[in-house]
Image (tube, rainbow, N blue to C red):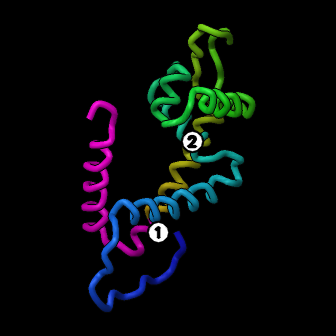
Amino acid sequence: MTNHTPRPNTGPMPPTSPAFLLAALGRHIRDDIEKSLRPTGYTLRHLSALGHLKREPGISYSELARRAGVTAQSAQATVRQLEQRGAVERRSFPGRGHTAELHITDKGHDLLEAGKRAYASSDKNLSLVLDSEQLTVLTGFLLTALSAHQPGA
């Protein structure tokens, strides 16, 4: 997000969709995080894969893809990039029918820390326009909305 002073609301809010507003804000936050990650050579997709692998080492490609909302081929390409860059290591034999036992390396953990810093920076930008109570309420609303979009919900 850009650091700018919000325009004061001088009249009634125009009717708009909360989903549209969340998508627009999400796009800005995603852009900010991608920009913060650029010096590392990694993207949010890499960060997402590492986060899933950290929570569940040895997760399969198909499960990783399902959780990330991408195709298995896309998940494999992302993991292959992470392997080539030394952020992930495979502890099983490659090949059809084999579960890829994927684990995060020290380099991968360093990237996750860079991701935490990028998210913290975006959180700080939000705190420039929302006070702590508003941030708490927003977080609660977002958690409630996200829980309704989880598989099986």
Residues shaded magenta: 124-153
Report the residue at 58% width, 42% height from top. 45
Residue 114: x %, y % from top left:
58, 49
Residue 46: x %, y % from top left:
61, 40
Q: Is residue 94 left or right of residue 19?
A: right
Q: In this view, does 12 lie to the left or right of 50?
A: left
Whether residue 53 appears in this view of the structure is: no
Does 65 appear in magenta?
no
For mark 1, what is the residue?
125
Whether residue 125 appears in this view of the structure is: yes
For mark 2, what is the residue?
47
Quarter assignment of residue 111: top right
Q: For residue 115, which numbered disc appears in the image?
A: none
Amino acid type at mark 1: Asn
The correct choice, above or below, for 58 with respect to 10 in the image is above
Q: Is residue 153 left or right of residue 68?
A: left
The rendered magenta stretch, by its main secondary structure, is classed as helix
Report the residue at 51% width, 60% height from top. 27
The correct choice, above or below, for 138 with respect to 146 in the image is below
Amino acid type at mark 2: Leu
Quadrant of the frame with the C terminus: top left
The correct choice, above or below, for 125 with respect to 88 in the image is below
Residue 139: x %, y % from top left:
30, 56
Q: Toward the viewer: 59 or 103? A: 59
Residue 47: x %, y % from top left:
57, 41
Report the residue at 32% width, 42% height from top. 149
